[in-house]
Amino acid sequence: MLIEIKSLFKSYDMGDVVVPVLFDINLQIRKNEYLAIMGPSGSGKSTLMNILGCLDTPTEGQYFLNKTDVSSLDDNALSAMRNKEIGFIFQNFNLLPRLNALQNVELPLVYAGVKNAERRERALMALERVGLSDRILHKSSEMSGGQRQRVAIARALVSKPGILLADEPTGALDSKTGEEIMRLFDELNKDGNTIILITHEQEIANYAHRTIFIKDGLIHSDNLNQKKILNFN
Amino acid sequence: MQYEENIRLAIRGLIDHKFRSFLTMLGIIFGVASVITMLSIGEGAKRAAIAKYQDLGVNNIIIREKKLSDDELEEVRAKFSQGLSIQDATVIKEIVPGVLRIASQAEISTEVKYTDKSAKSTIIGITPEYVEMLNFKTAKGDFITKDHYNRNLKVCVLGAGVAANLFRNEDPIGKMVKVEDQWLEVVGVLKSKTLFTETVGELAARDLNTDIYVPLSTFLKRFTHENILASEIQQITVQVDNSNRLVETSQLINAILLRHHFNNIDYNIVIPYELLKQEEKEKEIYNFLLGAIAAISLLVGGIGIMNIMLATVMERTREIGIRRAIGARKSDIMSQFVTEAVAISITGGIIGVILGVSLSLTVSLFTDVSTYIRLYSIFIAFGFSVLVGICFGYLPAKNAANLKPVDSIRYE
């Protein structure tokens, strides 16, 4: 089991008020699964994503990633987790504007302490995988939205993470480019990657094999997408 | 290898925002430049002072006759004092402990002639000990020897200025010059000496290069003072074995002279070494002030850096959030921003060093103020600029590192 979440609660302490966001979340995710987490704004899906991505820790309960109890990790250990096990993909790409594509993709490896030559090789491979070998020296200002998202995906892939965590990956793209990106995710899933998609759009969630519906901090449903699974192979 | 990345990033940041970076480092540039310039001015002054006193002899006590008007002279003679005499010198040599050597000299101011040229000069009759006690180096020929002295020979040694005036390109050695009604043979020419342009204690300012030296014995025989009341000799130079004993020895000498001169104080005792120490002490306050100014400007420079770094961190909140999400630890973020701060301060330091050195050279070329740049001052100033970068970059860097990734990523 790649991910196990047991009786997870999360609330924010805002001074005099304590705001509860997630209640008694129980979740299991296997390797190579492709799942979507859906819900309206305020449902807690972003909070759940932050916890899954080791950007935040639960108030109560446990989160096991690859058998490690993430909830008990300190800041440095969490950073290492993010570096090696999580590949983030954001709605607005979040590339560093002063670096070119290659340097952006290399960045996780820089923090991992990987040496120059190996770093470069792995980054080039990741860029090739997303189909951007001819744009490696361009800065993000010199690229289209679709290309930027591909760079972001390459960056997420480069450290061979346990999970790819995509937060509304097509939110800033037109529908045609969005489709291209979703097709890329399909390929990556076929390659063996575990993908967790966060979205509020049904059309995007339909690309995944399993959909978890969350509302008001609780999981309302957790269903397999039969059509997708049948069509996939 | 993260250091490489940090450095590369820091330099890129500097170049991308040239104008802003320059404004930020102005304080450092000025601070470093002023440290170097002020240290070099201080060092130059120190060396000039030492050189000035070197010529008078560091371990020497100089007893000089007081310049008195004719009336005062009459009065003093009436009270039995004959002024400085060779006997004074002899007694001092015998009685006072720690005296290595003693030299007497007599002087008159007159003209010296060679063929059709003449020059104003001071003729100084000296004893052979003189040359060992003071730094007299001959450019040509020899100085007055014991032999010259013992045989009362009519020889002379010219100061560099006189020789140049009278002889131009000729070799003065062996030629005859006329002083008053005496002919003297030139046996040596002195090297040029530090121009004595200020008064040291009671020793009046003079240009030592216009002096001519003759044996004292010859002087006493052949020359007479214009004034009948003048004393036999004008100066006694006493060389003491230990600079720690200078004050003590001078007090003893004073006691002896008072007795010999029947309590007439018609002489001055000057201790160049003590005067030098006093001058240095007075300069200390001045140096301290200069140092304070330099320190304050470095501080201001550091605050400028901190300000800009704080603003920079805010500007780049999102970037910091992204880096943290990708796996940067707090320490990674800290080292990135401290490196940036140090890059600014080092660059400012380098420019400041160049500016400081140029300023020092300019000052010494175009003004009377002498400067001397010592290597250590460059290292100190530079080292401080690095330190300022680290210290004032620390707080902004810590702020950056403590930003919560979850929030910073969404920062607009």
Image: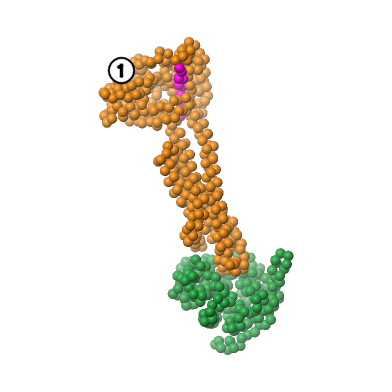
Chain colours: A green, B orange
Task: Please tell me how crowded label 1 is: few (under 14), some (14-19), or many (20+) other residues with Cα within 10 Å.
Answer: few
| For residue B178, above or below residue B10 | above
Q: Which quarter of the rendering shows the C terminus of chain B?
A: bottom right
Report x, y in % for residue B16: 48, 61
| For residue B33, above or below residue B407 | above
Report x, y in % for residue B299: 55, 49
Q: Is residue B353 magenta?
A: no
Location of residue B366 by image quarter: top left
Who is closer to the viewer here, B119 or B274? B119
Pointer 1 residue: B182
Q: Is residue B227 left or right of residue B115?
A: right
First to last magenta residue range: B58-69
Who is closer to the viewer here, A186 or A40? A40
**Residue reaching furthest to the right:** A16
Q: Is residue B67 magenta?
A: yes
Q: Is residue B159 left or right of residue A197?
A: left
Residue at x 44% of width, y 23% of height:
B237
Q: Is residue A28 left or right of residue B133?
A: right
Which amino acid lies under the numbered mark 1 shown in the image of this protein?
Gln
Please report, as a chain letter, where disc 1 is located.
B
Residue at x 64% of width, y 69% of height:
A56
Who is closer to the viewer here, A122 or B13? B13
Location of residue A211 by image quarter: bottom right
Who is closer to the viewer here, B243 or B407? B407
| For residue B303, above or below residue B291 | below
Residue at x 49% of width, y 60% of height:
B17
Q: Is residue A57 visible?
A: yes
Q: Is residue A61 visible?
A: no
Residue at x 52% of width, y 82% of height:
A176
Q: Is residue B55 left or right of residue B309?
A: left
Report x, y in % for residue B314: 58, 62
